[in-house]
Image: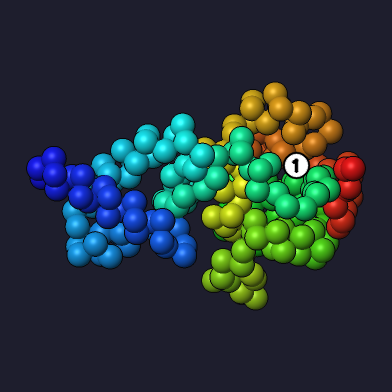
Amino acid sequence: MSGRETDALQRAVEATLFAAEQPMRVEALAAHLGDADSAAIRHALANLAAHYAPRGVHLVERDKRWHFETAPDLAYLLRRTSEHVRRLSRAATEVLAIIAYHEPVSRAEIESIRGVQTAKGTLDVLLEADWVRIAGRREVPGRPVIYATTPEFLDHFGLASRKDLPGIDELRATGLLDPVDDAYDALMGENSGDAPAEHGDIDEYDQID
């Protein structure tokens, strides 16, 4: 492909993503642009991502889908209303972590890892936040519902894919793991025991003013 053809393809990819209502996969871009070569599309995306890296909008990949988003350091300019920062309850944080590292998982599997029952409200909070979705049913007796994370989860935490999730040492370093949280050790496979967690479930958000 000549330099002129490469530039033309890059401009076409840029225009397509700018006008797209939803993030797009490489395959969708290739089909939209007349069965363009996927390798050439990826090269164009990499060039565009580098071009936009220092600008006010970035081209990013989330769950193998590409889209434009506001540069994180400029997000405050687009907020028209005041916000109350909220954090998930300890129970919801544990459930979200278990789903992220073990998806797809059923409620029973979540409870087995945590060592305590999980209130329906905890999963409802994660579903309403669009960080967790119903991914179908397990093909076992009773066909329980199974849960998985969403592209919105990856986008919120700045992850390109689940491969970018932090390891157990990183969780400890950031304070997300402390000695009483056996559930976190269990979800990472470092706790072979079946002792229940020392705390119960919580359904609501904790408010931070």
Q: How crowded is mark 1: few (under 14 residues within 10 Å), some or many (20 or more)?
A: many
Q: Mark 1 points at which residue?
A: 183
- Percent coordinates x, y for residue 69 in the rendering: 52, 48
- Whether residue 32 sits left or right of residue 203 in the image: it is left
- Can see residue 193? no
Question: SS of the residue at dot 1?
Answer: helix
- Whether residue 194 sits left or right of residue 36 in the image: it is right
Residue 142 found in image quarter: bottom right
Residue 166 or residue 19, whichever sits in front: 19
Residue 107 found in image quarter: bottom right
Which residue does the image show at 76% across and 64% down from the upper left? 124
- Whether residue 153 sits left or right of residue 17 in the image: it is right
Q: How many labels does the image show?
A: 1
- Whether residue 29 sits left or right of residue 198 in the image: it is left
Q: Which amino acid does label 1 sit on?
A: Ala
- Placement of the N terminus among the 4 image quadrants: top left
- Percent coordinates x, y for residue 196 in the rendering: 83, 45
- Percent coordinates x, y for residue 99 in the rendering: 64, 52
Residue 97 or residue 159, whichever sits in front: 159
Which residue does the image show at 64% across and 56% down from the upper left? 131
Which residue does the image show at 68% across and 31% down from the upper left? 171
- Percent coordinates x, y for residue 50 in the rendering: 37, 34
Query: Extreme left residue here?
Result: 2
